[in-house]
Image (cartoon, grey):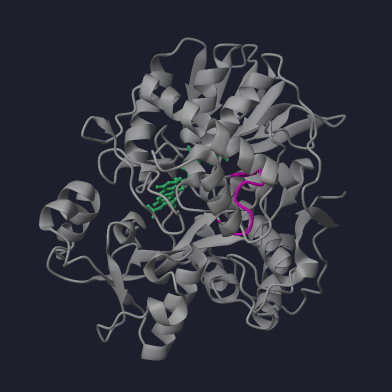
Amino acid sequence: MIDEGFDFIIIGSGIAGLYTALLAREVGNVLILTKGSIDECNTKYAQGGIAAPIGRDDSPEIHFEDTIAAGAGLCDPEAVRILVNEASDRIADLIEIGVPFDTQDGEVALAREAAHSRSRILHAGGDATGKQIEVTLSKAARVAPNITIMEHCLATEIIVRDGIAQGVIAFDSRAGSIEEFHAPIIILTTGGAGRLFKLTTNPDIATGDGVALAYRAGAEITDMEFFQFHPTALRLPGVPPFLISEAVRGEGGVLRNVEGHRFMHHYTPEADLARRDIVARSIVAEMRKTGSDRVFLDVTHLPRQTITTRFPHIYRFCLKHGLDITRGLIPVAPAAHYMMGGVKTNTRGETNISGLFACGEVACTGVHGANRLASNSLMEVLVFSKRIIETFGGKETVRDKKAVEERHFTLRKYDTSRITTPLRLAILQSLMWDNAGIIRSRDKLEEAALVLAAWYERLQKPTDRPYYELCNMVLVGRLLIEAALIREESRGAHFRSDFPEPSSGWEKHIIFRNTP
Ligand code: FAD
Ligand code: SIN
């Protein structure tokens, strides 16, 4: 066991964990605990890029307006203001660390993505932005002084005494042992929860562990009903739902139904470049109309060289599976992609538990509201990681004022005696996809809530990584479904067929907190 007086324990090694560690090591000793190898994370798969308002025709104000519009009334304007104002400095930091952003005519190249009114997406390696970032940061973290990295160590509990976070209990999945680590500052950077759903763009690590850990420790969890479904994941038999970046439509790609007709203009004036939630629901409606499980993304009208140089990763992946996208249509359908909700933080990453911070996809800073604008996630990580560490350099740590009203809840109790459904990962994922996916309704949500409550009551003590993760997913699934039941309206990514319109009475955040 290594427990050598760390100042920071960071749980996770995606962009949030690594970038925070590189900043934190300048003020103290850092331990990174990560449940797989260092580069197993969502970050590695990011394609489109990072949004920053640095173009000549752009400004933080325009980026602010686009982000607020996408968030459907639930963004925290203060958090968004911070995001857009600090974005260009954080890009400069990444360039200094060595991230090789693509350039055009000697300047950083800026791409367009849906619902951004300007071209403001920086990318690297064409569509391999996340991989370039992850590799650069992990190389830097491995050689940096003051950083200890423990791979294959799954955090299972945050130790809280007298309302103060004191350490972490972890399961070393190689040794099969339980370890305990102590530090005055614990930073959760455990990423999202896409694996809750049958179809997802997320890798295996995205099991919502951080939300479960934080909830069990007494932290506030908010906005869990808002889960983003990406409109275009590859839909080929036997092939995982590999992401086909929104930047493909930004570059001129268009959606067609199975009969070959364009359809997005029937649903919204912004057509193929509408907000992500609108495009995902329109695709579902079109698939239902045509009795198909897919639509097509067409880039065959674009110059071959544009496709192969701008999207080399997508091009090669499809080619490996027998599809030359320069000549043939790409079969696509929506898939679970990004968790907007999470552990509630203020704009310095603090949770309601002293000493416990959260950053990245696990956190809910208020930037995304009910629907994240593409490519704002990686930027959110950079901006709020920096603000967490600045706090220890003497920056003010005040609780932010509530920008939007909040409503507090605990998980409901159910009579689960009749439920006999066995708990298996595939059954959980299908249940979440069918009952709490893109289109929701009270009946379906209640059915799933009951099954999840039964599973939750009957959980055993975990002894291996898959079962730890499954337990976390059951809890996170419950938080998501309960929030989705409570929110009797449709807003952003949360759509209820029984309440299809937004309600002004629901411009509020739903917050869960575990009460003993
Ligand atoms: P992650 O990168 O997921 O890292 C989480 C880390 O925590 C991992 O190392 C994991 O192993 C570790 N971990 C989890 N649980 C535990 C535990 N219990 N104990 C120890 N370690 C644990 N966003 C954009 O802004 N632009 C894009 O172009 C973009 N494209 C995307 C494409 C895809 C296919 C996907 C899936 C996401 C994309 N996103 C994009 C979203 C973005 O990549 C993520 O939101 C972001 O990378 C999250 O970073 P993170 O560090 O918070 O989490
Ligand atoms: C994409 O490239 O479409 C994903 C971008 C994102 O999720 O921000």
Left or right: 330 with respect to 116? left
**Relative side of 73 to 334, left or right:** right
Q: Is residue 202 above or below residue 394?
A: below
Q: Residue 512: where, in percent of width, then height?
A: 78, 54
Q: Is residue 364 visible from the viewing direction of this image?
A: yes
Q: Quarter holding the N terminus?
A: top right
In the image, what residue occupies the spot 76% across and 25% down? 397
- Residue 334 drawn above or below residue 393: below
Q: Residue at x 28, y 64 (%)?
A: 239
Query: Going by the image, does 309 lie left or right of 458?
Result: left
Above/below status of 478 relative to 498: above
Residue 152, given in percent of the width and then of the height, sits at 47, 34
The total number of labels drawn is: 0
* Residue 367 highlighted magenta (yes or no): yes
Is residue 446 highlighted in magenta?
A: no
What's drawn in magenta, residue-wise? 362-371
Magenta stretch prevailing secondary structure: loop
